[in-house]
Amino acid sequence: MEQAEKYLQNALDAFDFGGGEVVGAVRYGKGHINDTFCVHTQPGENPCRRFILQRISAGAFHHPEQLMANIVGVTSYLSKEIAAAGGDPTRETMQVCLTKDGKSFYADEEGGAWRVYPFIEDTICLQAAETPELFEASAFAFGNFQRMLKDYPADTLYETIPHFHDTEDRLAKLKAAVAADVMGRVKEVKAELDFVAAREADCSVALQALREGKLPLRVTHNDTKLNNVLIDRESGRGICVIDLDTVMPGLSINDFGDSIRFGANHSAEDEKDLSKVNFDLSLFNVYTRGFLEGAAGALTDAELDYLPWGAKLMTLECGIRFLTDYLEGDHYFRTHREGQNLDRCRTQFKLVSDMEQQWDDMKAVIDQYRK
Ligand code: ADP
Ligand code: GN1
Ligand code: MG
């Protein structure tokens, strides 16, 4: 039994779930980091209500109290923004449910932290861009998320994972993993290490632009995968950005780029057959349109110039992270089979190569939507 199952019952007891009786809790979702459960409750004679209960990954997040303070701050702020604009905060942002003793999370005996959100019903959560329209809808949601938070006081946010999108630091960590070679796997990944070595200078491009003051630091999501947005089942609109654990000061180009990394292709992140893994410029095009529409003029000219870099660097960095985790024994990203992190790394590097081939076309797409 995994740790989370062991402590599940105590966590269920810690929350009151709007007064309903808990009738079941099952593992849920396809996230790589947290342990997620869907909780079914029965509030008297009223219809069953669902909640999301999560054990926050202690491996990824070392200060759950800081992480939850960020989320309470950001979701309260978004609720006000959404209500002021005539929207529905119960569907368009996450809402933190408190424990029976009024806290934003429950700590189990091992210090594992659990939190609860109402389940946002009548939405879909996609693992791949099923249609260009749905991908564009996710883009609008992430661009709009950035716009809504543009005046949020960034200095009140804790850095939940230090150096999260510090690509130079990710590269250094890969080198340390190679030097340690704890699993004896370095010999299997020569080609991947050569691929990274040829792109070492790239790892500094966005950070250098930040250091030179060309790119501004903003409040960003930092994990803008397609499966971190909920799409309204009826209207097909991207209505709610979820997975707020990594909301921190960051670069807008990374939020754009991480979505492109995950969604602008037609294959799974761990696809073994690389002939199926192809960067899709037309999906890049619709995502750009949706993101810039959602951001509604919030981005500077320099940020627009660097959007292709955001896409390439988030993809390269994620490949580096998967490779590092493979070399270190798969302790960070949840895996379901042997070699899965190496397969994930290879898909990312294939996508990086494709983007390099289509670099001028990517820049032309950005120019197409520049106001
Ligand atoms: P992880 O960090 O592990 O990716 P997420 O917070 O993204 O965890 O949650 C995992 C999955 O649970 C999401 O991809 C989504 O399918 C589902 N989910 C999370 N929160 C909600 C919610 N409030 N309503 C409906 N589904 C949700
Ligand atoms: C993780 O939590 P999830 O599954 O949405 C990871 C991201 C990676 C992604 C790769 C906190 O995202 O940074 O890009 O996997 N999240 C964290 O799929 O490390
Ligand atoms: Mg997620």
Image (cartoon, helix red, strand yellow):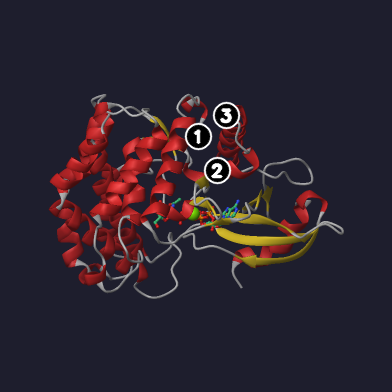
Labels 1, 2: front one: 1
| In the image: residue 232, left or right of residue 256 | right
Q: Is mark 1 within 8 Å of ligand 2?
A: no
Q: Which label belongs to residue 63?
A: 2
**Label 3 neighbour load within 10 Å: few <14, some 14-19, many 20+:** few
The reply to whether callout 1 and callout 3 are in contact (CB within 8 Å) is no
Q: Which label belongs to residue 85?
A: 3
- Closer to the eye: label 1 or 3: 3
Q: In the picture provided, is 245 more to the left or to the right than 14? A: left
- Residue 151: x and y in percent read 48, 24
Name the amino acid, label 3: Ala
Q: Are marks 2 and 3 in contact (CB under 8 Å)?
A: no
For label 1, the residue is 158
Q: Local crowd at mark 1 within 10 Å, few (<14), some, or many (≥20)?
A: some
Give the crowd class for mark 2: few <14, some 14-19, many >=20 residues within 10 Å: some
Taking 90 as reference, is 60 above or below it? below
Report the Cα–Cα distance between label 2 and label 3.
33 Å
Q: Residue 78 appears in which quarter of the rendering?
A: top right
